Image: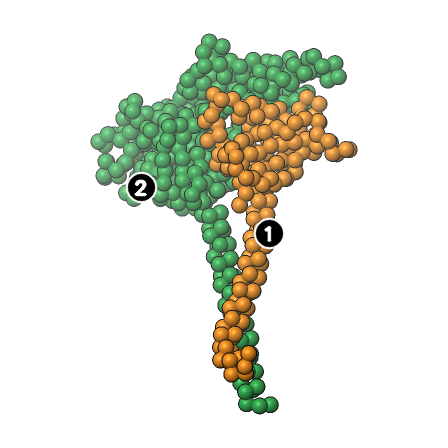
Chain colours: A orange, B green
Amino acid sequence: MRKGQLQAMEPIIVVIMIVLIAVVALTYFVRLSKSEATIMASTMDSKDALAILQRASTLPELSCALSETQGTACIDLYKAWFMEILMNDPTQDMLKIRYQPIFGNTNVSVEIIKIEDGSSPFNPIQIYNGLAPGVDYTVTRTYFTIHEATTDGRAFAIMHIARESR
Amino acid sequence: MRRGQLGQSFQWIFVIVAGGAFLVFFAMLFRTCAQIGDEQIKGINIYSVSEKLQSGAWKGDTVEVVTIEESLASCPADSVTIIGGGQAAPMDRAPVFIPPALGGEMTIVTRRAEIARNTESPIIIGGVVYAFDQDTYYIVVQDIQQQEWRKLIDILPDGLNIKLISSGEVRDIENLQVPESAKTAVLVSTNPANLDLMTQGLKLPSKPDRYYGVMLNFKDTTSDGGGTARFYVREGDRFVPARKNNRLNYATYHLATGAMVAADYDNFRCANEAFTERLRIITTLHEFRARIISDTLLEDDQFRDPYCAANLRIAAEALYRMNTGDGDEVPDNEKYLELFATHSGKLSHVQRGLLDSGCPVIA
């Protein structure tokens, strides 16, 4: 290429360079933004999970009895079981609508965990299933105390909250 | 350095400066977008009526002032729903004082709803939501319910038109004028004699078609009793008993420390239904739980405790009769509330015994 031709192409090269820099910058900020959005979504999910746990543990349908753990998130094991039975009862289809403002479009289940070995003595108890079937979902977990009234036993439990992926 | 080389250097400097400018421009653009997103999320959380109701409604003694537009209040088949911020909140944590006309600013106050609140170990059944309308004039006679009303009014913010009067002051009710600015008046008493005096003597504003009156009479406030209510409406210059299509139904006094009041019968009906349906779930759940624990305490050698088992069985039977209409047929809502009133005294007694004996309790 002659020197004259190179000089003639200089403005084009300049434009290309500018566009390249812009694309690189754009890519960088899109990635940065995505990363921030992911962190934000994760924080929001955690906050939502805590809010759902707070609501659930103060609902008379799930809360521990007055004489039990007060001031902490506590759910009664038998009530949780009964909620699962109700939610799976086809004649009680209005219940999902009734509890939707409390649990949102989520599936909420609770699982007892044995501290000693991390195993679970029961299958998870699904206390609410408001997530549309077939959608992609993410699960957030939060922790609480579950109370079993017969033995006055308290156990460590995990609340799994599945919601549609953002 | 030759002239051409100098020109090229300037071009490269230009490229770098332009690139940097682009970089700053995009950075600012993305930051601005992110900030707008944050504000929108924050806005929904702060201003959503449903969020407020959900976060506070089952706790005791929370006070929220919310603005509810009339157009946003709806009454679907079985609940009053308030829609705000894209969310819907059924007001099924009543009994509530629903302002006669939904709309404008209301003060939402939540209290714990308990069975037999006069005992040391009440059964908490949930929350009570009182919604006070700033344009409504409330006259409350402090007689038997004095303590509860005082506690409620103590946590209310200023600016509400609530006039507390003593039984003695009812005789001078003629001196009490409902303000002209009030859209409605709600009158509360537990004494039938007071009701008569108030209906006859209260001075009403000069525009009768804008007002109506409500009087509540809870005839029995003991833990075992039921409750009655009367509903009066303004007709001409007098209060008269309301006709059926706008009569007042009520939740019994010890069921929760309030009653539902609504000028619009549909509003009342759906709130009452929503509340009763919710209560049915709770008492059915209590029955199920009491029965399971009772059976386990009776049959499992490891946890055998006949005394606790027997008392929980009594509770389960009382709850069964409440939930099933004494086993005959599933009661309608009105009958269910009557049964609730009938059996809640026994439940309270059993609950206290269970608690004192260190047994598992009903709720």
Q: CA distance from mark 2 to mark 1?
A: 51 Å
Q: Is residue B266 above or below residue A4?
A: above
Chain identity of mark 2: B
Q: Which mark is residue B207?
A: none
Q: Secondary structure at mark 1?
A: helix
Q: Position of residue B73 (x, y in %)?
A: 36, 38
| Amino acid tagged 2 | Ala
- Crowding around mark 1 (Cα neighbors within 10 Å: few <14, some 14 to 19, many 20+) is few
Seen from the viewer's position, the closer of residues B257 and A138 is A138
Seen from the viewer's position, the closer of residues B165 and B343 is B343
Q: Position of residue A117 (x, y in %)?
A: 77, 33
* Residue A68 seen by the camera: no
| Amino acid tagged 1 | Ile
Chain identity of mark 1: A
Residue found 54% across the figure and 67% down from its top? A20
Q: Which mark is residue B182?
A: 2
Residue found 63% across the figure and 39% down from its top? A141
User: Where is residue B185, by image quadrant?
Assistant: top left
Q: Residue furthest bottom?
A: B2
Q: Position of residue A144 (x, y in %)?
A: 65, 36
Q: Quadrant of the N terminus of chain B?
A: bottom right
* Residue B252 seen by the camera: yes
Q: Residue furthest front?
A: A1
Q: Residue furthest right?
A: A116
Q: Which mark is residue A39?
A: 1
User: Is residue B291 found left or right of A10 in the rendered image?
Assistant: right
Seen from the viewer's position, the closer of residues B117 and B286 is B286
